[in-house]
């Protein structure tokens, strides 16, 4: 069940922040309409990784060489770049 609180509850921000857990954001409303969401850093990192994977898959689906220099990548280089994008390697 989603956790929902009015924006005015931010006066008690400590209580609101305690409600935020991984995979369990808190949605803030104003005049009964959703305006903000508070989520954990873990969720944010997972979201950014997912965006990177989607971006890579979008580029691959275009059929253009993803190397940027007009050359196709080797399997090894593609694997390395995917790992970098999903944060498995720096």
Image: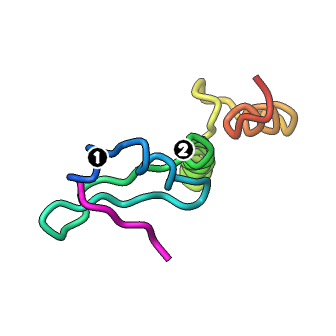
Relative height, residue 77 to residue 19 (above, below): above
Q: Residue furthest bottom?
A: 1
Image position, residue 14 (x, y; %): 42, 42
Q: Residue furthest right?
A: 76
Range drawn in magenta: 1-7
What is the count of numbered marks?
2
Q: Quadrant of the C terminus?
A: top right
Q: Quadrant of residue 83?
A: top right
What numbered label is drawn on residue 44?
2
Q: Nearer the viewer, mark 1 or mark 2?
A: 1
Task: Specify whether residue 12 is in view.
Answer: yes
Residue at 49 percent across and 55 percent down: it is 19
Q: Quadrant of residue 6?
A: bottom left
Residue 6 within the segment the image draws in magenta: yes
* Apparent side of residue 85 relative to residue 6 in the rendered image (left or right): right
Relative height, residue 34 to residue 61 (above, below): below
User: Foreground residue, 42 or 55?
Assistant: 42
Count residues near mark 1 (Cα–Cα under 10 Å), then give few for <14, some for 14-19, many for 20+: few
Q: Secondary structure at mark 1?
A: helix
Image position, residue 28 (x, y; %): 30, 58
Give the residue pinned by disc 1: 10
Residue 81 within the segment the image draws in magenta: no
Task: Specify whether residue 63 is in view.
Answer: no
Residue at 41 percent across and 51 percent down: it is 16
Residue at 48 percent across and 50 percent down: it is 39
Q: CA distance from mark 1 to mark 2?
A: 21 Å
Image position, residue 75 (x, y; %): 85, 39
User: Foreground residue, 74 or 33?
Assistant: 33
Q: Secondary structure at mark 2?
A: helix
Count residues near mark 2 (Cα–Cα under 10 Å), then give few for <14, some for 14-19, many for 20+: some
Q: Residue furthest left?
A: 31
């Amino acid at each position: 069940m989603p956790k929902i609180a009015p924006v005015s509850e931010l006066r008690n921000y400590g209580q609101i922040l305690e409600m935020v857990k991984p995979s369990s954001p808190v949605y803030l409303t104003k005049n009964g309409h959703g305006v903000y969401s508070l989520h954990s850093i873990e969720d944010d990192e997972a979201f950014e990784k997912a965006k990177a994977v989607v971006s890579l898959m979008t580029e691959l689906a275009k059929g253009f060489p993803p190397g940027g220099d007009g050359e196709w990548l080797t399997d090894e280089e593609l694997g390395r770049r995917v790992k970098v994008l999903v944060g498995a390697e720096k």
